[in-house]
Image (cartoon, rainbow, N blue to C red):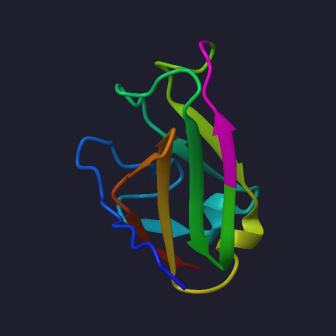
Amino acid sequence: MTYELKEILIDPELPASTILQAKGAVIYREAVVNGGTLQVPVIPQAKAGDTLNVKLMAYGTWSTDLVLDEDNLGLPLNFNVQYRSFSQGDSAVASYSLTRGANRFFSPETIYELKD
């Protein structure tokens, strides 16, 4: 059996994602009781046909994929995350990756403290 090792690289060219309801590096649960908004800023190097995978690791892992097209290129993209993801635990980590063909590029992780 042969295994192929893949190196996971964080691309410093990709801007970090944010949770819009955060106050600095803290998310107060009362601010996300109706859900939170994970925003991926404009990705200058994105092209139509690239796949964006957005992920939030908090109380479980929430993720979604979006194939980019001409309508969403050059815009910040907002994703609604249910309150359940923020309801327990003490941290949340937001990130995304961009896939183009066989190449996958990873954003830096944005780490938040969750508080009541």
| Part of the protein shown in magenta | 64-70
Residue 56 lies, with reference to residue 67, above or below; the image says below
Q: Is residue 95 above or below residue 49?
A: below
Q: Which quadrant holds the C terminus?
A: bottom right
Q: Which residue corresponds to the image point at 70% horizontal and 48% vertical from the top-left?
A: 80
**44 and 110: which is toward the camera:** 44
Residue situated in front as seen by the camera: 92 or 66: 66
State the image quarter where residue 23 is shown.
Answer: bottom left
Magenta-colored stretch includes residue 106: no
| Mark count | 0
Quick check: 47 above or below 109? above
Q: Residue furthest front?
A: 1
Residue 26's image quarter? bottom left
User: Left or right: 73 with respect to 109?
Assistant: right
Position of 96 with respect to 64 (left or right) is: left
Position in image of residue 107 (x %, y %): 37, 52
Residue 22 image offset from top left, x and y in percent: 47, 57
At x 43%, y 28%, the residue is 46
- Residue at image coords 47%, 23%: 47
Q: Position of residue 9 (x, y in %)?
A: 30, 60
Q: Position of residue 28 (x, y in %)?
A: 55, 69
Q: Nearer the viewer, residue 1 or 45?
A: 1
Up-down: is 94 above or below 39?
below
Extreme left residue here?
A: 12
Please identify the quadrant where the N terminus is shown. bottom right
